[in-house]
Amino acid sequence: MMRSAVVRARRGMTLVELLVVMAVVGVLIGLIVPAVQMAREAARRTSCGGNLRQVAIAAQLFESARRHLPAGMVDAADRTIPYATWATQLLPFIEEGALWQATTDAYARRKDPFGTPEHVGFARVLPLLACPSDPRVARPQSSVEYGPVALMSYVGVAGRDGRSKDGVFYAGSQTRVRDIADGQSMTLLFGERPPSDLFEFGWWYCGYGQYGLGTPDMVLGVREQNLGWGGNGVCRQGPYEFAPGAFANRCDSFHFWSPHPGGGHFVMADATVRFLDYEADAVLPAMATRSGGDRADPL
């Protein structure tokens, strides 16, 4: 009897029991993995929105110091920092004073900022401008013509499009807070738009865009037009709308979108960050203009 009990105690799992255990483990993994992925995306999404808020606060500090917001893109004829983006102008206000000094020194030596050795910022990644949900912006990427270039996940809101100049940021703009007659809590400053597939657009340091308008490089309208610039002649003319996009689709550089499910972040002139669903597209033209008298709130 003792020997029989020992044999029974040492008996291993049957095949059926093993299959049941494996099935249970599989179900648990199927439940846990998506939950972990969702938690990680939620953290990335929160960080992405936090970046936009810090950028908006820096723009407010710039306006307090200079009496106007930074230009969406500095005019090519400017004698100090031509082609510089709004992000470059914000360097002293995002704790990048050393890089700002290096930038002004580089411009003093060479006014052409595109990929030259003097302009170290051209390929310097700034984490504040990089949404964690887009792994491409975490390191410099090779552009078609200029080699390694640092990118950003955010663009200034130009208004309806780059030519309308009815938003806050456009080529040569010097918008003051008091110019935002529609209300700071109702007017868009920046929004999410990942860099283009071949990294032609989305540079943080400098840019040119379509015919010197800055779009769709560092500024963008909520009904942007494709003017047939360069390789983007393959895309429809537009106007483009706030809608889902994909990293591999070059035409998606002409509209706001994000890698987050369901919508994207925007930040208002009062530094309030909002995550807007794509269904809110209809009210974006009213929110994008600074003084159109057509206030709108999607919430």
Image: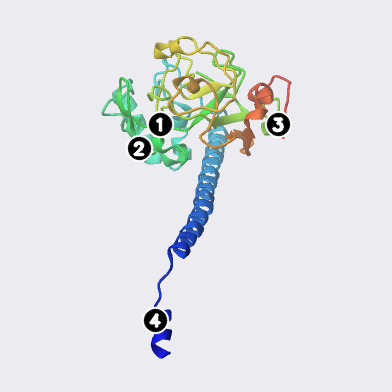
Q: Position of residue 190 (x, y in %)?
A: 56, 30
Which numbered disc flags the more N-terminal residue, 2 or 1? 2
- Select label 4 or label 1 by which is in front: 4
The residues tagged by marks 2 and 3 sit, at their Cα atoms, a distance apart of: 35 Å
Residue at numbered disc 2: 139
| x, y percent for residue 262 | 59, 35
* Crowd rating for badge 1 (residues with CA inside 10 Å; few <14, some 14–19, many 20+): many
State the SS at label 4. helix
**Residue designated by label 3:** 298
| Crowding at mark 4 (Cα within 10 Å: few <14, some 14-19, many 20+) | few
Label 2's element? loop
**What number is the disc on residue 7?**
4
* Dot 1 amino acid type: Leu
Q: Could you say which is closer to the camera, residue 112 or residue 8? A: 8
Cα gap from disc 3 to disc 1, whole angstroms: 29 Å
Give the CA distance from mark 4 to mark 2. Answer: 62 Å
35 displayed left or right of 276: left
Q: Do residues under tags 3 and 1 come within 8 Å of each other at their CB atoms?
A: no
Q: Amino acid at mark 3?
A: Pro
Front residue of 213 and 240? 240
Q: Amino acid at mark 2?
A: Arg
Please rate how many residues cluster around mark 2, counting C-alpha atoms within 10 Å: few if below 14, some from 14 to 19, many from 20.
some
Asked whether 118 or 246 is in front, the reply is 246
Q: CA distance from mark 4 to mark 3?
A: 72 Å
**Residue 151: numbered disc:** 1
Determine the CA span between mark 2 and mark 1. 8 Å
Q: Is residue 72 visible?
A: no
Observer-side mark, 3 or 1, equals 3
Looking at the rendered structure, the kind of residue marked 4 is: Val
x 52%, y 10%: residue: 237
